[in-house]
Every structure is written in C-alpha cells, then in structure tokens.
Amino acid sequence: MTGRPRTRLDRVRASVGIAQLALQQIQDELTGEISAQELAQILRELHHEDHRQDGVFGSLAQLLTVAARIEPDRDGEMSCPLHEAAALITENAGLQTYYATRALDPQGESA
C-alpha cells in the first residue's frame, strides 16, 4: 500500500465493488432447484412493498436522492433526473418485482 490517502472516489469504487460481489453471490444462489416460494422470499429482499426504503432498491433510490440534494448551481438540471431515477427504481422496478413475488407466492406477503 502506498502512502497516498484513499480519495472519496477510491472509497466509492471499493464499495461499488463490494456491492457487485454481493449481488453476484445472490445471483449464484439462484442456480439449481429453487421453489417459487423461496424465489419470492429472495426477491422480497430486493424490494419491500410496505417499507420501500428497505431492500436493495430502496437503498439505491435513497443514494440517488441524497446525490440529487448536492446540486452546485441549484438549477434542477442534475437533481431532476436523479429524483426521476430514484422514483423509477422504487415505483417501476419495485412494483414489477412486487407483482412477480405475488405471482410466485400470493400468500407470502406477511413473511
């Protein structure tokens, strides 16, 4: 290790790498035999309909929302697309995942 301190971008890149490895591990868990109920439970970890801030989608949307608040010139040119991206994650990807879990395991919503 060099004496150079890690920059913010270095730390972010390391965190993104860890997140990618974690998602790859989840993807690896989906190989082989898996029941519809178990798949639904795994997908519910990505998006919680009752608590949208929870799960992977909620965390990613929150990250984009925080980034949108740091707009240097406050003209909305950067923040509006980031807010839209956050909304698409929770409202579109999250809703579609919710529909998939309901189709896989309609009784498992309270699990």
Image: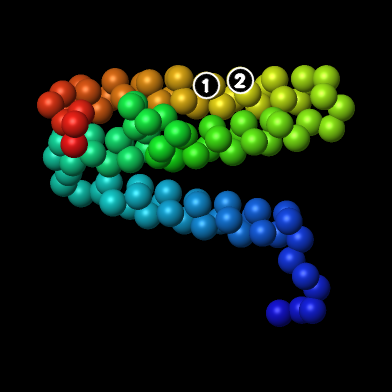
Q: Is residue 57 visible?
A: no
Is 45 on the left or on the right of 35, as rendered? right
**Front-lying residue, 38 or 51:** 51
Numbered label attached to residue 80: none
Residue located 65% across and 53% down the image: 12
Q: List the residue tagged with mark 1.
A: 88
Residues under numbered marks 1 and 2 in contact, where contact means CB atoms less than 8 Å apart: yes
**Front-lying residue, 74 or 22:** 74
Numbered label attached to residue 84: 2
Callout 2 secondary element: helix
Please provide percent x and percent y for residue 7: 76, 61
Residue 65 versus residue 11 in the image, above or below: above
Residue located 28% across and 51% down the image: 29
**Quarter of the image with the C terminus in it:** top left
Type of residue at label 2? Glu
| Numbered label tally | 2
Residue located 55% across and 35% down the image: 62
**Toward which corner of the image does residue 106 lie, by quadrant?**
top left
**Toward which corner of the image does residue 53 lie, by quadrant?**
top left
**Toward which corner of the image does residue 52 lie, by quadrant?**
top left
Type of residue at label 1? Leu
View extreme (right): residue: 73
Q: CA distance from mark 1 to mark 2?
A: 6 Å
Is 46 on the left or on the right of 66, as rendered? left
Residue located 58% across and 56% down the image: 15
Callout 1 secondary element: helix
Is 105 on the left or on the right of 4, as rendered? left
Please provide percent x and percent y for residue 4: 80, 73
